[in-house]
Amino acid sequence: MARTARGIEMVEKARELLSKARTADELRQAQAVVLPLEFGFSIEQTAAIIGVSKGWASQLRTQFIRSGGKKDEKKLPHGGRRRENMSSEEEGAFLAPFLEKAAKGGILVVGEIKQELDKLLGRSTALASAYNLLHRHGWRKLAPDKRHPKADRELQDEWKKNSRSLLPKSTRSGKGKGRSG
């Protein structure tokens, strides 16, 4: 047998919110409270009626009941970094010595940054965390080019064609003929 719905003391506030709701979210929250208490719907039926999952319908009810029916005006929208280890300014200060060293011609070693990050946070982090930290602050991994930017392909091809005539005759043979003797 299903549990009886709790929050009977919030029905009046939920009814009030039903008539004054300005957003679909407010309406759904009020419906998540009123439907089980007034009409005896199960949480599954309530979720189907208001168009959300069973878990979300339960969360809407719980939030409304815990807040005492008050709207949370300071609620931030979704997005951003919820699990950040440091603020952006703290990250910049942490990376400054490493980036300064790299700017003077040194090599930026991500393993060293990871070790210092582990010390600072007091726990082990993934190597990807160090790379993500660098990426957020505009660092990118530089790899050597496949060819020199000032290379002249035509001049190189010309040298290849004429270089055989510049070699001594003993090394020009090419096919590796054996000594006859």
Image (cartoon, helix red, strand yellow):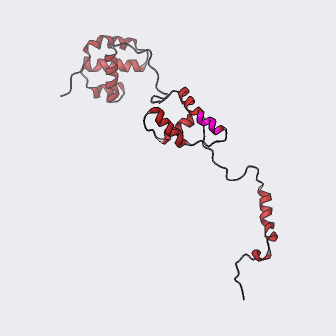
Asked whether residue 137 appears in the rendered view, the answer is: no
Say above or below: 156 vs 12. Answer: below
Is 168 situated left or right of 120 in this image?
right
Is 143 situated left or right of 47 in this image?
right
Q: Is residue 100 magenta?
A: yes
The quarter of the displayed image where residue 158 is located? bottom right
The quarter of the displayed image where residue 68 is located? top left
Q: Position of residue 13 (x, y in %)?
A: 32, 11
Of residues 111 and 24, the one drawn nearer to the viewer in this rendering: 111
Say above or below: 98 vs 49. Answer: below
The quarter of the displayed image where residue 82 is located? top left
Of residues 171 and 148, the one drawn nearer to the viewer in this rendering: 171
Q: Which residues lie in the magenta part?
A: 97-102
Of residues 24 and 69, the one drawn nearer to the viewer in this rendering: 69
Q: Residue at x 53, y 37 (%)?
A: 132
Q: Residue at x 57, y 29 (%)?
A: 93
Image quadrant in which the N terminus is located: top left
Q: Residue at x 46, y 26 (%)?
A: 78
Q: Position of residue 139 (x, y in %)?
A: 60, 37
Image quadrant in which the C terminus is located: bottom right
Asked whether residue 108 appears in the rendered view, the answer is: yes
